[in-house]
Amino acid sequence: MKKGLLIIVSGPSGVGKGTVREYYMKDPSLNLTYSISMTTRAPREGERDGVDYIFISRDEFEQKIKEGEFLEWAEFVGNYYGTSIKQVEKLREEGKNVVLEIEVQGATIVKEKCPDAISIFIIPPSMEELEKRIRGRRSEPEEIIQQRLAKASQELKLVGNYKYVVCNDDPELAAEVIGLIIKRNQN
């Protein structure tokens, strides 16, 4: 069986990575599976453990760091996020194309460890639209919103580190473009 692709999808907070993912994950011809990240942050309204993230304690996360269980991990606005090496490799060996939705720091680490990974960066149509989306969540205090916007400005400067850049002006169209990128890389 052919080993599956490793697909890195990054973009600033609020760009709509999850919304776009909902569309491209529905295409059975892409043979995709989503790698669920672990995090120490509290679930947002509607998020489910084991579906959106694997929610664990800070102590558990730090133990996993010590044991080398992460393909990548990062700390962002006071919370840890990480990807299990074992989970990703198991899925790829089963022939599945694994989608990692991770931030730029983690993406850099994964690209170093897995140079065959396909990297896609999703950009917003504008910073104004990005701010509108982040504020529209109504889930975080102003201080966190400002941190997310500052981080987004820094992350957008790193689009050149990715092989593909997709604008999310229309989530369905962005998903179609990502689907075409994946198909092109499935040889």
Image (spheres, rainbow, N blue to C red):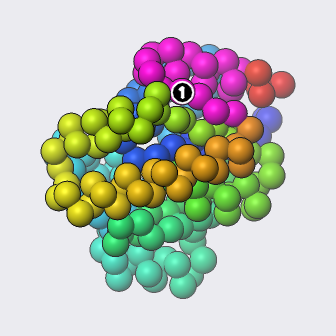
* Number of numbered labels in the structure image: 1
167 part of magenta stretch: yes
**Label 1 sits on what residue type?**
Cys
- Residue 131 visible in the displayed image: yes
- In the image, 72 versus 103, the foreground residue is 103
Q: Is residue 164 left or right of residue 133?
A: right
Neighbour class for label 1 at 10 Å: few (<14), some, many (≥20)? some
Q: What is the x, y in percent for residue 92? A: 68, 44
At mark 1, the secondary structure is strand
| Residue placed under numbered mark 1 in the picture | 167
- In the image, 13 versus 157, the foreground residue is 157
Where, quadrant-wise, is the N terminus in this rendering? Answer: top right
- Residue 94 visible in the displayed image: no
- In the image, 26 versus 118, the foreground residue is 118
> In the figure, 74 relative to 158: above or below?
below
Q: What is the x, y in percent for residue 157? A: 61, 50
Question: Residue, x 77% and y 28% (percent of image)?
Answer: 185
> In the figure, 86 relative to 127: above or below?
below
Our reading of the magenta stretch's main secondary structure is: helix
Q: What is the x, y in percent for residue 180? A: 67, 18
Question: Residue, x 49% and y 77% (percent of image)?
Answer: 64
157 part of magenta stretch: no
Which image quadrant for residue 70? Answer: bottom right
Question: Residue, x 50% and y 15% (percent of image)?
Answer: 173
Q: What is the x, y in percent for residue 162? A: 70, 43
Where, quadrant-wise, is the C terminus in this rendering? Answer: top right
Range covered by the magenta-colored residues: 164-183
